[in-house]
Structure formats: structure tokens, C-alpha cells
Image (cartoon, grey):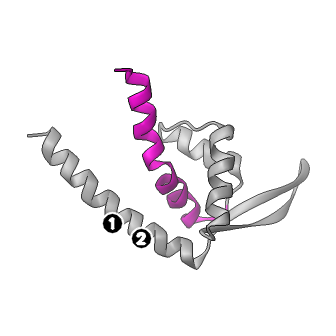
Amino acid sequence: MNIENTQSQMRKGVLEYCILSIIKREELYPSEIAERMKHAGLSILEGTLYPLLTRLKNAEMVTYRWKESSGGPPRKYFSLTEKGHEFYKELKQTWDELSAAVNTLTHS
């Protein structure tokens, strides 16, 4: 088995949850989202982040607005929709249950 592939699959499984968790706190520009994830130890490439944000937008989980930038072109700032908040709550419950079960199994 390839450990890198398994690690990558494990990370991919939680990316949407992490992104929604970050955006639910405040409206953010994608590079700020990536920076917060990197700071937490979960690096994400822009080539992964932008398609995820597009999928979340198409599913009406997030929305964006253009905001003027002090040093360049306007930027898209993302925030959660009401549907996104509900989806986040469901993901959080699933994560809490999954995390507790994995911790029980791996720390016994």
C-alpha cells in the first residue's frame, strides 16, 4: 500500500468540513482560508481549494461577494449561506461521532 495515497484520502475526507468551519466564523478570501488551514497544520493547494469552493457554491452552501482590494483587483470573499450553516451542523455531528469512535478504537 502507498502511505501517501492513504494520507491524502484521509485529508480529503475532512476538507469540506474544515473549510466550512473556517468560513462560518467570518467572510474570507480564499488565500486567507488556505493560510488558516496551513496554520492549523492542514495545508491545501489553491488547485484543490478553488474547485472545492466552486462545488460548495454550486451546492448553495456558500456565497461570495466582490470586495475592493487595497493592493490590486477586487477579491471574492466567501461566507456561509443558511443552507451551508445547516450542512455544517450535520457535518459537525458526523465528525464528532466519527472522531469519538476512532479515538476509542485507537487509544484502547
- Location of residue 89 in the rendering, given as x and y in whole percent from the top left corner: 42, 70
State the residue at coordinates (83%, 64%): 66
- Residue contact between numbered discs 2 and 1, judged by CB atoms under 8 Å: yes
The secondary structure type at the circle numbered 2 is helix
- Location of residue 8 in the rendering, given as x and y in whole percent from the top left corner: 46, 33
Task: Say which mark, if any, is on residue 75.
Answer: none
Looking at the image, residue 86 lies above or below residue 95: below
Q: Tell me the quarter of the picture where residue 83 sits.
A: bottom right
Mark 1, residues whose alpha carbon is within 10 Å: few (<14), some, or many (≥20)? few
Residue 70 located within the stretch drawn in magenta = no
Q: Which quadrant does the C terminus fall into? A: top left
Highlighted magenta segment, given as a residue range? 1-27
Q: Is residue 53 visible?
A: yes
Query: Disc 1 marks which amino acid?
Result: Gln
Task: Say which mark, if any, is on residue 89.
Answer: 2
Query: Disc 2 marks which amino acid?
Result: Lys
- Location of residue 17 in the rendering, given as x and y in whole percent from the top left corner: 47, 56
Q: Residue under circle 1?
A: 93
Disc tally is 2
Looking at the image, residue 3 lies above or below residue 7: above
Instruction: Name the outermost residue toward the bottom.
Output: 82
State the residue at coordinates (68%, 56%): 54
The secondary structure type at the circle numbered 1 is helix
Mark 2, residues whose alpha carbon is within 10 Å: few (<14), some, or many (≥20)? some
- Location of residue 91 in the rendering, given as x and y in whole percent from the top left corner: 40, 63
Q: Nearer the viewer, residue 20 or 1?
A: 1
Q: Is residue 35 left or right of residue 8?
A: right
State the residue at coordinates (62%, 44%): 34
Instruction: Name the outermost residue toward the top.
Output: 2
Kindly report the secondary structure that dominates the magenta region of the rendered protein: helix
Q: Is residue 4 left or right of residue 28?
A: left
